Amino acid sequence: MLDFFSRSPRKKSDPLASADAAKRWVDAQREELGSAVHGRVAALVAEFNETDAESLDSSTLEALLALNFETHGLHEQLGEQYLMNTRMPRALESQLRGQILHYGKQFLNAYERFLALDLQSEDGVRVYALLPLVLSRMLHYLGEYARWQFYRHYAPDDAFWLNANRLFLFAEDQGIDTVPVHLFGAVGESAGTTVQDQFLILHMLSLLSAGNLGIRQLHFAYEVLGRLSNRLTIRRDFSEEASFMIALDRGRPAARCNSAIGSAHGRYWSTAEFLDALYGWLAALEAGRPPAELKALLEPGIDAGLLRLLCREWAVKSVRFERAERVSVADRQIEVAYRLTLLHRLIRQPDEQLQMRGTQSHPDNYNDMSDIRIYGFVTGRRKDRAAGAAAVPEAAAPHHDLSRWSVENVSLTGLGVSLDAQGNEWVSLGALVGFRSQEKPDWSLGVVRRIRRLNRERVFLGIETLSERPVAASLRPLDGRTDMSLPSDQLWHGGQIGIFVPTRREGRSLNALLLPLAAYTPGKQLVMSARGKHFQIGLSALLEKGSDWCLAEVELVRPLEHAPRP
């Protein structure tokens, strides 16, 4: 048990006696514990938060600021570790998240204690001089807590927002909301910031919490805000040019500005200058010249498309865009499956049953009934027979690996569903899912585009329909030599599994193929066999990818009479 507060007056060895004592203590602990000093400091500050108010003075505050500064690098490393390994085991993820948030919470509580001091006293004047840095760090850690909520598709509660808004109001009342400070570095080593900057970063990030951005995309948006927040200015008076607004006496995040709030606590800001810089970066990125400010942040999934989305969400005025009309439904459920291997097995099941029946009763008519639709090729599949093929009763039989989700609404492009959080921990943005209903027993494929946690028990998902006509396929090299050392569930009919998905992108119909991620190589040519048909295809642009699958556009080279033999 740490016991630094049982002695009065404090000794020089007490880490909270002064900033120098704090630095010496951290250096000694680092030699003994290495990176574990991060947790030791959090425990020290937690014990300080249990002491009485007599220990509060400017020297103690300076020591806390020093402890925070000396271990901030380790704190950042923990965050980077989480961002770089988003698929860690749940227990490890929970432990790491708890360690990060505990550190920030203890410093938040410690700093808050000094806000109630008499700032007119001799020592209070020294505390007041430190308040711009203290309040900036408090809003920084409030922003960190909010980010971790957004990462998991939760939303901070009203009490959180009221606390953040009142903190900024306190800074305004003290006249220190725009005093520049260096958050965690000396002059020249880090960019300057203000209480207002940190407040705006928090609220601008909250505008992206609709559940359609991944962890790294949200982190990228946070880094962008850190670089450009000084181009935003909060004003007390409403104007027609205002983009966003906030009521400092309410527990709500920022919202689009449509009219004056009608309260002395209303605050407004425009994103015009902010967007000028963002559009400049977007133009450079689209021209193939990544801006120097963004080079260190660019990675797969962080591209011009994400910048365009940020430009839309943070636009000076609301951007109107077309979206499919949603129709609410009730008492409707769908069966859901995931993992490419299981989806391939479920999609091919009706065809295998149909083929078995066809070869037993009418050996010559299976191929006629099993044509597939390939854009650019004319096929002769008859609608009545296709409908008959879809109505095979066994295809709708229950499967032990399937989940049941409740459908909330449907549209031309997808559907919204709700489900239990427990048992569906695999769900993530960009996850590939197969689904079917009693009305349409054929399998459809979709991709999760939006996640919103309604509460700790229920989750809402927005699913974009990828294809309503997926076809199980077998993929072979042109010489017919398939790598038979692959796992058995990735092999079918002498080739590697794939799913042919006629789909639409940007208003055009195209041929696409779902295949294992490791099997994709641009320009690679394969023989695709599906429903008794054989085609030579070439893999073209990569349209999308997940953890173990990818969606590639395919070019149809020519139809084949027979599959190649090794």
Image (spheres, rainbow, N blue to C red):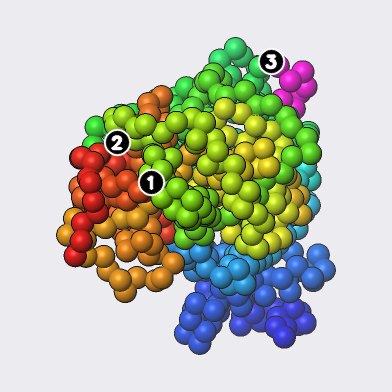
Give the magenta part as a residue range: 260-266
Q: CA distance from mark 3 to mark 1?
A: 72 Å
| Disc 3 residue crowd, few under 14, some 14–19, many 20+, Cα 10 Å | few
Camera-side residue: 66 or 248? 248
Q: Give the labeled residue for mark 3.
A: 259
Residue at 19 percent across and 65 percent down: it is 566
Relative side of 38 to 398, left or right: left
Is disc 3 placed on a helix, strand or loop? loop
483 sits left or right of 175 in the view: left
> Which of pointers 2 and 1 indicates the residue nearer the eye?
1
Residue drawn at x 32%, y 61% is 495
Q: Is residue 80 above or below residue 521?
A: below
User: What is the C-alpha distance between the residues marked 2 and 1?
Assistant: 57 Å
Q: Nearer the viewer, residue 278 or 366?
A: 366
Q: Please tell me whether mark 1 sits on a helix, a strand or a loop.
A: loop
The residue under the point 68% across, 61% down is 423
Q: Which residue is mark 1?
A: 364
| Position in image of residue 124 (x %, y %) | 71, 53
Decide: marks 3, 2 in contact (CB < 8 A)?
no
On the image, the x and y values in percent for residue 401 come to: 62, 62
* Kind of residue indicated by mark 2: Leu
